Image (tube, helix red, strand yellow):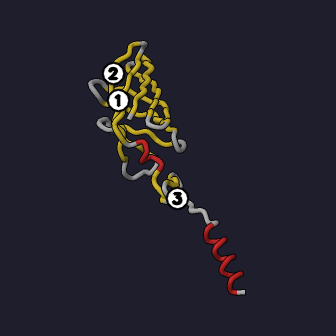
């Protein structure tokens, strides 16, 4: 009888699946924030108005919101929409000039891709970036 109870308990215990909080995922038996896999330095190519140039993007932690990823150096951010996808809500970017920017993108393995629309003085520009970590 004791052997039967121990067998049932063992089956129940090994059949459990760990669950994680929202915007976290299971990785190597631990819960980690989904956004952590995005962090890093990506080297790639920008395309803007048909012109291409080499460039880089760095993504880092955005404190205070588990769904946000900081676009390092600009103060702007991406917001997760899924485990490997994000959007850039409409934001004002202050650089050499001030413009509005919004878009979306994804991470596939170590490859980051995003497409954005920039608006400055009533003119709209399409910006695309693809880079590898």
The residue sitting at the top extreme is: 50
Q: Which residue is situated farthest in the left direction here?
A: 96
**Quarter containing the C terminus:** top left
Tell whether label 3 touches label 1 (CB within 8 Å): no
Q: Mark 2 points at which residue?
A: 54
The answer to whether 86 appears left or right of 97 in the picture is right
Circle 3 packing at 10 Å, graded few (<14), some (14-19), many (20+), is: few
Q: Earlier in the sequence, mark 1 or mark 3?
A: 3
- Would you place residue 42 above or below residue 67 in this image? above
| Residue at the spot of label 3 | 21
Quadrant position of residue 102: top left
Q: Which of 21 and 12 is in front in this view?
A: 12
Question: Foreground: 12 or 19?
Answer: 12
Could you tell me residue 12's position as x and y percent?
66, 71
SS for callout 1: strand
Residue 13: x %, y % from top left: 61, 71
Circles 2 and 3, Cβ within 8 Å, touching? The answer is no
Mark 2 in CB contact with mark 1 (< 8 angstroms): yes
Q: Which mark is residue 43?
A: 1
- Depth check, mark 1 against mark 3: the one in front is 1
Residue 100 drawn above or below residue 85: above
Disc 3, SS: loop
Q: Nearer the viewer, residue 112 or 73?
A: 112
From the top left corner, tell me how far across and down residue 95 is, in percent: 29, 28
Q: What element carries label 2?
A: strand
| Disc marking residue 69 | none
Please name the residue shown 36% across and 37% down the image.
71
Q: How many numbered callouts? A: 3
Kindly report the distance in space between the C-alpha atoms of the residues bearing marks 2 and 3.
38 Å
- In this rendering, position of residue 75 left or right of residue 34: left
Q: Going from the N terminus, do you reach mark 2 or mark 1 first?
A: 1
């Amino acid at each position: 009888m004791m052997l039967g109870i121990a067998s049932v308990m063992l089956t129940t215990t090994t059949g459990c699946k760990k669950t994680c909080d929202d915007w976290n995922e299971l990785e190597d038996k631990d819960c980690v924030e989904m956004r952590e896999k995005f962090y890093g330095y990506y080297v790639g190519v920008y395309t803007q108005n048909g012109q291409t140039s080499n460039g880089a993007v760095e993504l880092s932690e955005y404190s205070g919101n588990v769904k946000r990823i900081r676009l390092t150096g600009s103060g702007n951010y991406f917001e997760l929409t899924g485990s490997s996808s994000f959007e850039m809500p409409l934001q004002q970017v202050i650089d050499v000039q001030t413009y509005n920017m919004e878009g979306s993108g994804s991470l596939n393995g170590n490859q980051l891709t995003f497409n954005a629309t920039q608006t400055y003085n009533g003119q709209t520009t399409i910006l695309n970036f693809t880079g590898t970590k």
